[in-house]
Amino acid sequence: MGNVMRVADLPTPALVVNTPAITRNLDTMSAALPGARLRPHVKAHKCTALAREQATRGHVGFTCATPRELLGLADAGLTENLLLANESVADARLRAMADCGANVTVAVDSEATIDAAARNGINNVLIDVNVGIPRCGIPADEAGALADVARARGLTVLGTMGYEGHAVLVPDRAERTTLTDTSMATLERAHAAVGGNILSGGGTGTYDVNTTATEIQAGSYALMDTAYAKLGIPFELALAVVATVIHTNAKWSVADCGLKALGMDHGDPTIDDATVIFCSDEHVTFAPNTPVRVGDRVLVWPAHIDPTVAYHDAMHLADGPGVDASVIDRWAVDLRGWDPPT
Ligand SMILES: Cc1ncc(COP(=O)(O)O)c(C=O)c1O
């Protein structure tokens, strides 16, 4: 067994997945939202191997944030039902999606995005409705008229989409539910004017309180992060960055996992049995409760999974928690970047 690689043997910083934990997360979600009730968002993991795990559990429709993600899934043979839940006016990318051999739907929220979809051969659209987060999406009152414009351009309007991103991380479940209900009432109002069968919305934080959307676009639930872990939802932290201790002194220690290996917009990462002091480009400075030595490995838990994964080329699958676990597989983070696959 001399050549079994352990997590502690990986060059650092590196993404490590606790395989039993991710398996439990995938199974828990599949039991809660079986089949087409879940349209997993791949932006949270950018990994076709993980998307296949989701498809194996019956979720064959996927949500994408970028044309790159959608085209990568199509290349991997996951062609059944792909939604670009985002606006695009990029002719070449829309054309590539129309020609990729997958069943493709794109979100539109303006005449300009409808024009772009129609002139590049896209057939199916969802009208993206603003349900409370200041991002894309048309006001609900204007959604019906926009659907008419889309139909007049020859597009098939399959329904509406509205993402309650301002609700998903609200810690109090009752408050999260109220915000979600208000958002989904807005989406239903728009939907009554738009028509179609799909009301797409929801995320990891609202997967069980959003009972209006016909499909939930959750993504983070598979790998999780410390921000979502605070909600008390039944998903475990399954992804960490393994780092090497490169300095210690009487007051603090330093490991080689900084801003360039971590999504930081939800705050500092955490390290077990330690207090994180701050991160800089290639360093995390922390105060361990139990002394560490230069060369030791530590697991750094990110606060925001999506941008963390996007910094890395691969995830290393371990057969359990901790740095002594064995590495049993490697999944490429193959949906990164913006250019179509070559
Ligand atoms: C359009 C859309 N749907 C769904 C989600 C939910 O993703 P998650 O489950 O990671 O919260 C997001 C996340 O930002 C999103 O942008």
Image (spheres, helix red, strand yellow):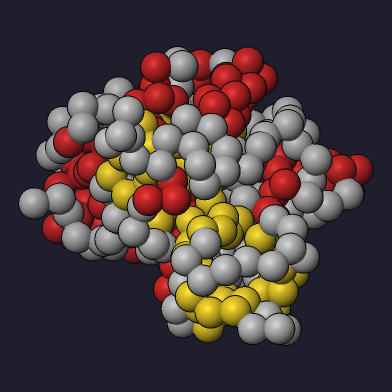
Q: Residue at x 72, y 84 (%)?
A: 251
Q: Nearer the viewer, residue 151 or 224?
A: 224
The percent coordinates of residue 195 (x first, y second) are 53, 31
Residue at the far front in the pictured view? 2
Q: Nearer the viewer, residue 124 or 82?
A: 82
The percent coordinates of residue 215 (x first, y second) are 56, 29
The percent coordinates of residue 340 (x first, y second) are 17, 54
Up/down of 120 relative to 75, above or below: below
The percent coordinates of residue 207 (x first, y second) are 68, 34
Question: In the rendered view, does 167 fall on the left or right side of 57?
Answer: right
Q: Residue at x 39, y 62 (%)?
A: 12
Up/down of 182 relative to 123, above or below: below
Question: In the rendered view, does 244 fall on the left or right side of 212?
Answer: left
Q: Residue at x 64, y 22 (%)?
A: 28
Up/down of 273 relative to 192, above or below: below
Q: Nearer the viewer, residue 228 or 236?
A: 236
